[in-house]
Amino acid sequence: MNFNFTEEQLMIQQTARDFALSEIAPSAVERDIKAEFPYEIVKKLGELGFMGMMVSPEYGGAGLDTISYVLAMIEISKVDASVGVIMSVNNSLVCYGLEKYGSDYIKEKYLTPLAKGEKLGAFALSEPEAGSDATKQKTTADKDGDFYILNGIKNWITNGINADYYLVMATTDKEKGHKGISTFVVEKGTEGFGQGAKEDKLGIRSSDTCSLTFENCKVPKENLVWEEGKGFNFAMNTLNGGRIGIAAQAIGIAEASLEASIKYSKTRKAFGSTISNFQAIQFKLADMAVKVDAAKLLTLKAAALKDAGQSYAKEAAMAKLYSSKIAVECALEAIQIHGGYGYVREYLVERYLRDAKITEIYEGTSEIQRIIIARALLDQK
Ligand code: CAA
């Protein structure tokens, strides 16, 4: 087993770190307060190759491995988890699936601009009555000549307002249950496509989330991804990779919490000493450091399995389950170490807690991750 990163992986990590500190950090607090989308930052991430990191250069991507993606996601999310999720959805939920399952036409027309960061993607699986129970899709797609006609509602769509292209799961054959679900690329502006109001969220406020509506939305048949009836498998397979991305996002938040706590504890004085000299604080820092490292090991293992072409669904679920849990724990401890200062915006750690919570919910709640892990352990499909 080799714990050393390659030179290329270290270079990507450094580039992401430098970019995050110089270009993302200065506006992070204000964008959080105003719930403002980071347009310029996303454009620059695209120019750096960070919006299609694992896509092959043939389709405009950076051709990197999943380990590099994890390292970059950690650095970006450490500074601003909102930017992290925008990047993660485009990379793992949209580009990955289109490269793996899309036709040449789809790869040329949609994947290439998405991977270059010229266009932004979103992934529309959840519905008002199909969240964790994702097989219960009510959105329909009826074949009509050279088109599919989509009708239904999608909920909680990250990049929902600002995306250009949407991967939409819809039922082409109700009789077949989840084996009758298909995936389509829908362009913003298609007649019958509508967007709900931007959600006013607790955290990751500078990423946008909204519902989508489809009212007799006419989608060309060429925009079917993979084949009819494969949409649920498509969603599950892409979500496995997405969970690695969200685990990395959570690690970024946890690591930021730890670093802020170390820094603060070395300057804050109480009872005649800096608080870093007290075991009550030292034990908290030590526990946080162990958690961050354990989360990294789980996440890098899942990434390494994916890169090696081995199955990684269980490992990705473990990585997301654990990393999201410790992100919340570390953010809470960071607030405790900061005392009253931790409860106000100036010291950032209150945002880390608000941002951390969603990692236990989206791309499969912690309860769903446990189901996936337990089924794999018990060999139940
Ligand atoms: N990887 C690959 N395939 C999987 C899978 C996984 N992790 N989990 C399930 N599947 C496959 C099964 O093998 C099965 O395939 P076949 O029919 O071809 O054999 C199929 O999916 C159905 O699975 P089950 O019979 O086990 O169905 P179930 O209803 O008992 O359980 C579930 C399914 C695992 C709970 C699934 O519904 C699930 O993952 N739910 C969570 C959905 C989710 O993560 N939503 C997040 C939406 S994206 C988001 O958060 C928004 C955003 O913008 C960030």
Image (cartoon, rainbow, N blue to C red):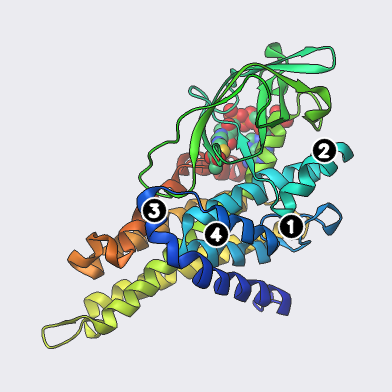
Q: Position of residue 86 (x, y in %)?
A: 56, 50
Residue type for callout 2: Ile
The answer to whether 6 is drawn above or below residue 191 in the figure is: below
Q: Which residue is mark 3?
A: 32
Which-is-in-front pick, marks 1 and 2?
2
> Is residue 318 shown to the viewer in this render?
no
Q: Specify which label sits upstream in the sequence, 3 or 2.
A: 3
Q: Which residue is mark 4?
A: 248
Task: Give the residue at x 45% y 53%.
Answer: 324
Q: Quadrant of the C terminus?
A: top right
Q: Which residue is mark 1?
A: 54
Quadrant position of ligand 1: top right
Q: Looking at the image, do the residues carrying marks 1 and 4 touch, with CB atoms under 8 Å apart?
A: no
Mark 3 vs mark 4, CA separation in Å: 20 Å
Q: For this view, does 327 lie left or right of residue 121?
A: left
Residue nearest the observer in this picture, 330 or 159: 159
Mark 3 vs mark 2, CA separation in Å: 35 Å
Residue type for callout 1: Met
Q: Looking at the image, do the residues carrying marks 2 and 4 touch, with CB atoms under 8 Å apart?
A: no
Q: Position of residue 272 (x, y in %)?
A: 12, 88
Element class at badge 3:
helix
Q: Quadrant of residue 75?
A: bottom right
Q: For this view, does 35 lie left or right of residue 194?
A: left
Which-is-in-front pick, marks 3 and 2?
3
Q: Residue furthest bottom?
A: 272
Q: Which residue is mark 2?
A: 106
Element class at badge 4:
helix
Element class at badge 1:
loop
Q: Quadrant of the N terminus?
A: bottom right
Label 3 packing within 10 angstroms: few (<14), some (14-19), many (20+): many
Q: Position of residue 7 (x, y in %)?
A: 72, 80
Q: Specify which label sits upstream in the sequence, 1 or 2.
A: 1
